[in-house]
Image (tube, helix red, strand yellow):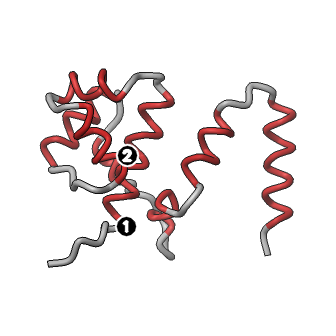
């Protein structure tokens, strides 16, 4: 058995964290609603521990979303469903969400698009 973290678990954890931060709730609040400790939520969010289906549905209910959304059932043909697992993506999304000015968000998108290729 390997100790490697599965990229799918990391992607699910990243979606959990992203949604939790979007709703501005703490790990402790999510943990209380899901019936686990905040340390367990930390492990789920990092992808260190795999989330069972039943627990995922409990977490989804607290986060006012669906299990499918947390699983990342996207229409990605080339592994796009794992894009959130890439290093820096969740931090970039958090920073982007923190920009209130629409013009600044648009400028950031222009820069990001310019850096592709």
- Examine the rendered structure and indicate whether residue 23 appears above or below residue 70: above
Please state which of residues 39 and 57 is positioned toward the viewer in this rendering. 39
Residue 46 x/y as whole percent: 36, 51
Quadrant placement of the C terminus: bottom right
Location of residue 31 in the rendering, given as x and y in whole percent from the top left corner: 24, 28
Residue 9 in the image, given as x and y percentages of width and height: 31, 59
Image spot of residue 75 (x, y percent): 47, 63
The residue sitting at 42% across, 46% down in the picture is 15
Looking at this view, is 18 or 36 the one in front? 36
Q: Residue at x 31, y 66 (%)?
A: 5
| Secondary structure type for disc 2 | helix
* N-terminal label among 1 and 2: 1
**Against 75, is 100 above or below?**
above
Kindly identify the residue that appears in the image at 28 percent across and 56 percent down: 48
**The image quarter in which residue 49 lies:** bottom left
Between 75 and 25, the residue placed more toward the observer is 25
Left/right of residue 21 with respect to residue 53 in the rendered view: right
**CA distance separating discs 1 and 2:** 17 Å
* Residue located at (81% from left, 46% from top): 108
Residue underneath mark 2:
69
Viewer-side residue, 98 vs 70: 98
Mark 1 neighbour density, 10 Å: few (under 14) some (14–19) many (20 or more)? some
Q: Quadrant of residue 16?
A: top left
Mark 2 nearby-residue class (10 Å; few <14, some 14–19, many ≥20): some
Q: Is residue 70 left or right of residue 93?
A: left
- Does residue 49 appear left or right of residue 102 in this picture? left
Q: Secondary structure at mark 1?
A: helix
Residue behind mark 1: 7
């Amino acid at each position: 058995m390997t100790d490697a973290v599965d990229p799918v678990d990391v992607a699910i954890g990243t979606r959990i964290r992203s949604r939790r931060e979007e709703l501005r709730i703490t790990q402790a609040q999510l943990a209380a609603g899901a019936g686990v400790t905040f340390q367990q939520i930390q492990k789920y969010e990092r992808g260190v521990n795999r989330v069972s289906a039943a627990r995922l549905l409990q977490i989804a209910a607290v986060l006012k979303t669906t299990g499918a959304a947390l699983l990342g059932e996207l229409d990605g043909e080339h592994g796009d469903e794992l894009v959130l697992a890439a290093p820096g993506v969740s931090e970039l999304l958090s920073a982007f969400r923190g920009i209130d000015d629409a013009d600044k968000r648009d400028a950031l998108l222009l820069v990001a698009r310019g850096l592709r290729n």
